[in-house]
């Protein structure tokens, strides 16, 4: 029959092959399936009469109590019973009760137990990982008597590798060869995980069907996942045939809740293990799994212990020194001591730039890598891969130095990452035959590769894999960096609080000085000068009168400055007293216009209320709003040339606020000054002799105390508009 190279989608179909629903048995045992609720027998294997005689011929439709009166109710875990009928294994699954019947075991239990005990002791004596693996294969071969026994380990991508082997003379070795994941697809791996032992006594068997073929209750093939004698996929039988294998036994190795690997036993002629021998194989599998787990934990413990010492050293320094880049990159030990791989490098984005140790990608490449990680893994605190160029194609250009990356996000800025790089490690993988050698015939039926001769392949774009203990050490480091950063922030906040308390005390002392030590003497000077002015007016002493009036102007300026400073300090301390109530804003605006109209007229300026201003009320302190408007209009009066205009307007600003604006036709304010004009004591050079520099700061404080905001728009050289908002009471 003509064959063709298999399409990738057909290869993927191996992962969906329903091997547990094959609906056929190997002829070494018989099967009865019954309704789990009432015990009625629904299906039987077509060879049941060979095992039960006449009772098997008429079993269909009867109750299981009639056939197996000595058995209890099946449970989820399989149980075993030996009787004159044979070896019976029974269990419950999916609402059905299963009964497997096999010939009575002939193995000498005592001899088997001795072999098993000796084998387990030999495995336990191993002093290294290599000894353990070799002894596991050798002792399994001795106990179970197969021609070839291999320890087969699954890699993270589910492809397998033979890492230990025991052979009889003349049997071909597969040690060190790799097998693609499609050789043992996902459904088969699931069956191996659910069953400790899987046996094929002779690949040239004639399968036995069920009567009826489908479950009468569900109309589907029964689930034979736990059935020891379940038939085998034709593809797998052809696979074994191409390997020259006649019989096989597979024992599962499990670790940490996953299928770690298999003990794959091959025989070049038919070989049947009875239930007793398969029980011994299961004991071996369980023992090897536990021993493997313990050995792995010892190795992991030693690695974690080393990394913990490094981490604690780094963390201790971080608590003292705020220079994170120096402590984790340049001091010793550092990040490279955490990942322990030749050619490793690391980088940290700190203070707006990349700091590094070792050979890392260019800054723009690390920027692009961080952007990609944030887009594709936005919620990941830690991201790692040992095949970066395959996931992020742009990284292919620097694969020699960074085929692997471990990234820790530090939530400070968008680029804040710690990046650990591992270089490319080119591997030559020895495959058992061409891994792409599956074919499909004209009907679409898959066929496994015909040859298992060594096939070499170079694997690129990969680094050494990241180990779980390295990831945990990275998490600990990230937590420590965040903790150190929080500690520094706390210390800064404490310092800021202490500084604020000192400033508060200084402010209170200043207010006391201004209120009493300065204001009272200035008040006395002002009073005396006023009396002198009156006297000099009467005596027409013009010379002394002018001097006295200069004194009055100076004391007035001093009082204004003191009052402004007291206002500012009260605002900053949150101590400004306000009596808020509903006020008509147009009335307030008109009051200020009337108050300043004479000054405007004297300087030939028009001061008016915009006729389109809305009628509304706001919850405000009337005197404080008058103070804000007076200050803003006062500034406009100073800077608007004769013949100019000053206008006040009232408008809505959103559903809950009202906006008051003061516009003028003065020279305007340069845009570069907008950020500073509300700061205390700030004045432009051209206005330094025209005020204290506190008026706008006071306006800002009063507006914000009302819950509003203030800002400026300048139409330089055509004028300025100051806007501020207040909370509405209601709108008419």
Image (cartoon, helix red, strand yellow):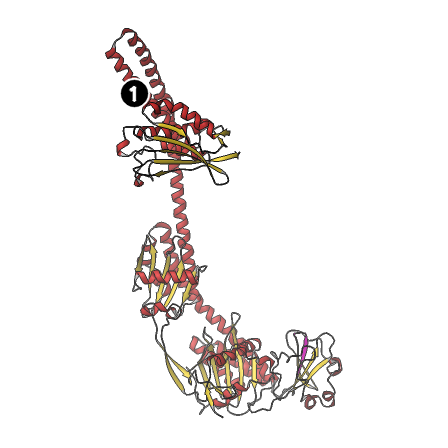
Please indicate whether residue 430 sits to the left or right of residue 105 in the image: left
Q: Nearer the viewer, residue 115 or 335?
A: 335
Dot 1 lies on which element? helix
Residue pictured at 74% horizontal, 90% vertical:
54
Please indicate whether residue 15 sits to the left or right of residue 704 in the image: right
Residue pictured at 35% horizontal, 73% vertical:
425
Query: What span is colored magenta in the figure?
Result: 92-100
Q: Nearer the viewer, residue 219 or 236?
A: 219
Prevalent SS, magenta region: strand
- Label 1 CA crowd tier, 10 Å (few <14, some 14–19, many 20+): some
Q: Is residue 348 above or below residue 262?
A: above
Residue pictured at 64% horizontal, 77% vertical:
78
Where residue 588 sits, quadrant-wise, is top left
Where residue 709 sits, quadrant-wise, is top left
Residue pictured at 41% horizontal, 65% vertical:
384
**Spot occupied by residue 246 in the image (x, y as percentages of width and height):** 52, 90
Check residue 94 for magenta coloring: yes
**Spot occupied by residue 59 in the image (x, y as percentages of width and height):** 73, 85
Check residue 610 for magenta coloring: no
**Spot occupied by residue 326 in the image (x, y as percentages of width and height):** 31, 55
Residue 505 in view in this figure? no
Q: Is residue 549 above or below residue 393?
A: above
Residue 382 in view in this figure? yes
Most distant residue in the top direction: 539
**Spot occupied by residue 373 in the image (x, y as percentages of width and height):** 40, 62
Number of numbered markers: 1
Q: Is residue 146 above or below residue 370?
A: below
Where residue 611 sits, quadrant-wise, is top left
Q: Which residue is mark 1?
A: 554
């Amino acid at each position: 029959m003509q064959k063709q190279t298999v399409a990738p989608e057909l290869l993927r179909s191996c992962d969906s092959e329903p091997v547990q629903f094959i609906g056929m048995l190997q002829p070494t045992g018989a099967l009865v399936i019954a309704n789990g609720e009432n015990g009625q027998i629904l299906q039987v294997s077509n060879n049941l009469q060979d095992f039960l005689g006449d009772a098997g011929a008429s079993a269909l439709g009867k109750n299981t109590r009639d056939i197996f009166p000595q058995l209890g109710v099946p449970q989820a875990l399989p149980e075993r019973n030996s009787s004159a009928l044979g070896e019976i294994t029974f269990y419950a699954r999916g609402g059905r009760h299963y009964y497997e019947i096999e010939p009575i075991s002939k193995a000498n239990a005592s001899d088997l137990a001795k072999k098993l005990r000796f084998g387990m002791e030999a495995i336990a004596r191993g002093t290294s990982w290599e000894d353990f693996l070799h002894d596991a294969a050798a002792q399994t071969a001795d106990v179970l008597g197969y021609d070839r026994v291999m320890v087969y380990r699954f890699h993270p991508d589910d492809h397998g590798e033979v890492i230990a082997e025991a052979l009889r003379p003349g049997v071909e070795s597969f040690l060190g060869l790799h097998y693609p994941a499609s050789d043992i697809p996902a459904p088969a791996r699931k069956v191996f995980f659910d069953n400790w032992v899987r046996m094929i006594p002779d690949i040239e068997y004639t399968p036995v069907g069920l009567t009826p073929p489908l479950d009468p209750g569900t109309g589907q093939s029964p689930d034979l996942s736990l059935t020891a004698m379940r038939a085998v996929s034709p593809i797998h039988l052809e696979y074994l045939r191409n390997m020259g294998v006649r019989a096989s036994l597979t024992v599962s190795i499990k670790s940490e809740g996953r299928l770690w690997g298999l003990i794959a036993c091959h025989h070049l002629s038919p070989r049947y293990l009875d239930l007793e021998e398969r029980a011994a194989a299961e004991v071996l599998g369980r023992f090897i799994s536990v021993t493997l787990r313990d050995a792995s934990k010892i190795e992991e413990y030693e690695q974690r212990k080393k990394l913990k010492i490094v981490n604690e050293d780094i963390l201790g320094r971080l608590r003292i020194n705020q220079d994170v880049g120096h402590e984790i990159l340049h001091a010793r030990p550092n990040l490279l001591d955490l990942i322990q791989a030749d050619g490793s490098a690391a980088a940290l984005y700190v203070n707006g730039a990349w700091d590094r140790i070792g050979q890392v990608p260019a800054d723009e490449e690390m920027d692009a890598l961080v952007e990609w990680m944030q887009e594709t893994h936005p919620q990941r605190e830690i991201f790692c891969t040992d095949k970066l160029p395959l996931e992020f194609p742009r990284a292919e250009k620097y694969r020699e130095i960074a085929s692997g990356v471990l990234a820790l996000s530090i939530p400070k800025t968008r680029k804040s990452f710690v990046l650990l790089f591992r270089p490319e490690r080119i591997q030559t993988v020895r495959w058992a035959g061409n891994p792409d050698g599956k074919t499909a015939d004209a009907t679409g039926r898959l066929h496994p590769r015909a040859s298992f001769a060594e096939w070499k392949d170079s694997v690129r774009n990969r680094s050494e894999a990241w180990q779980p203990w390295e990831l945990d050490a990275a998490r600990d480091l990230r937590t420590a960096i965040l903790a150190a950063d929080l500690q520094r922030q706390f210390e800064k906040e404490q310092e800021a609080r202490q500084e604020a308390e000192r400033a508060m005390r200084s402010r209170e002392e200043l207010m006391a000085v201004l209120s009493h030590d300065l204001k009272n003497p200035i008040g006395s000077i002002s009073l005396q000068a006023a009396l002198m002015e009156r006297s000099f007016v009467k005596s027409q002493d013009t010379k002394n009168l002018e001097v006295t009036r200069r004194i009055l102007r100076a004391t007035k300026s001093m009082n204004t400055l003191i009052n402004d400073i007291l206002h500012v300090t009260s605002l900053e301390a949150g101590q400004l007293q306000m009596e808020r109530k509903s006020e008509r804003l147009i009335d307030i605006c008109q009051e200020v216009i009337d108050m300043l109209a004479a000054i405007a007229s004297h300087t030939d300026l028009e001061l008016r209320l915009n006729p389109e201003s809305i009628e509304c009320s706001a919850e405000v302190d009337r005197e404080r709003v008058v103070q804000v408007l007076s200050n803003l209009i006062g500034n406009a009066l100073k800077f608007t040339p004769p013949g100019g205009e000053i206008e006040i307007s009232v408008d809505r600003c959103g559903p809950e606020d009202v906006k008051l604006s003061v516009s003028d036709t003065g020279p305007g304010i340069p845009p570069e000054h907008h950020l500073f004009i509300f700061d205390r004591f700030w004045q432009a050079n051209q206005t330094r002799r025209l005020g204290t520099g506190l008026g706008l700061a006071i306006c800002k404080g009063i507006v914000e105390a009302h819950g509003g905001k203030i800002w400026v728009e300048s139409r330089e050289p055509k004028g300025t508009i100051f806007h501020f908002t207040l909370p509405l009471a209601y709108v008419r």
